[in-house]
Image: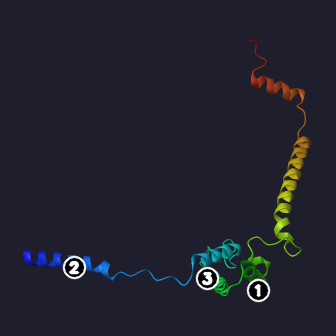
């Protein structure tokens, strides 16, 4: 039993000493950090056409992965960020941009939410006015008999 333990410990010691001797310097990646940062910057500007609420940097959809790969290839080809974005807009339209430019074809994207909000406020105001008018028209003053009954029910005719 003692031989097995000593044999095991010797083997463990040999492996632990030999492992650092075999270690090598990490091989450089094909993509440098500056280029990676550019890919991330461009990818965050582009909308995933499948998810629509995520950038291609965040999305795991197949199309987003393909678009990221296109961005990587264009960065490797030496294109500027603006050239890459322009290429994507040319290919997929302004919808691919997370912040589309303000122009006639995208005015609905910029003005639409404001118009809907103001329309909702107008509908709310009209509804309140109608309710107030309906309540005003449907209420009538109490007759003398009804007033007397109300006073009796509330106990106002009792002398204290």
What is the total number of numbered labels drawn onto the structure image?
Answer: 3
Report the residue at 90% width, 36% height from top.
140
Q: Residue 65 carries which label?
A: 3
User: Along the line of sight, which residue is nearer the eye, 134 or 121?
Assistant: 121
Report the residue at 81% width, 63% height from top.
113
Mark 3 vs mark 2, CA separation in Å: 45 Å
Mark 3 vs mark 1, CA separation in Å: 16 Å
Would you call the spot at circle 3 few (<14 residues within 10 Å), some (14-19), or many (20 or more)? some
83 above or below 146?
below
Q: Position of residue 91 (x, y in %)?
A: 76, 86
- Image quarter where the N terminus lies is bottom left
Q: Is mark 3 on a helix, strand or loop?
A: helix
The residue identified by callout 1 is 91
Q: What element carries label 1?
A: helix
- Closer mark to the observer between disc 3 and disc 2: 2
Report the residue at 76% width, 70% height from top.
99
Asked if marks 1 and 2 touch (Cβ < 8 Å), the reply is no
Q: Which mark is residue 14?
A: 2
- Closer mark to the observer between disc 1 and disc 2: 2
User: Along the line of sight, which residue is nearer the eye, 149 or 136?
Assistant: 136
Q: What element carries label 2?
A: helix
User: Along the line of sight, which residue is nearer the eye, 63 or 21?
Assistant: 21
66 above or below 116?
below
Report the residue at 87% width, 43% height from top.
135
Q: In which quarter of the image is residue 101?
A: bottom right
């Amino acid at each position: 039993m003692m031989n097995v333990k000593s044999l095991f410990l010797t083997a463990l010691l040999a492996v632990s000493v030999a492992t650092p001797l075999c270690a090598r310097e990490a091989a450089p990646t094909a993509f440098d950090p500056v280029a990676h940062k550019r890919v991330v910057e461009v990818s965050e500007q582009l909308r995933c056409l499948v998810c629509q609420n995520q950038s291609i940097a965040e999305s795991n959809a197949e199309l987003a992965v393909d678009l990221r790969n296109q961005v990587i290839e264009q960065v490797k080809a030496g294109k500027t960020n603006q050239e890459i974005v322009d290429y994507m807009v040319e290919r997929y339209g302004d919808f691919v941009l997370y912040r589309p430019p303000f122009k006639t074809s995208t005015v609905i994207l910029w003005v639409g939410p404001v118009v809907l909000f103001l329309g909702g406020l107008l509908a709310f105001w009209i509804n309140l006015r109608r309710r107030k008018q309906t309540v005003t028209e449907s209420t009538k003053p109490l007759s003398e008999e009804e007033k007397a009954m109300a006073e009796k029910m509330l106990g106002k005719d009792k002398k204290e």
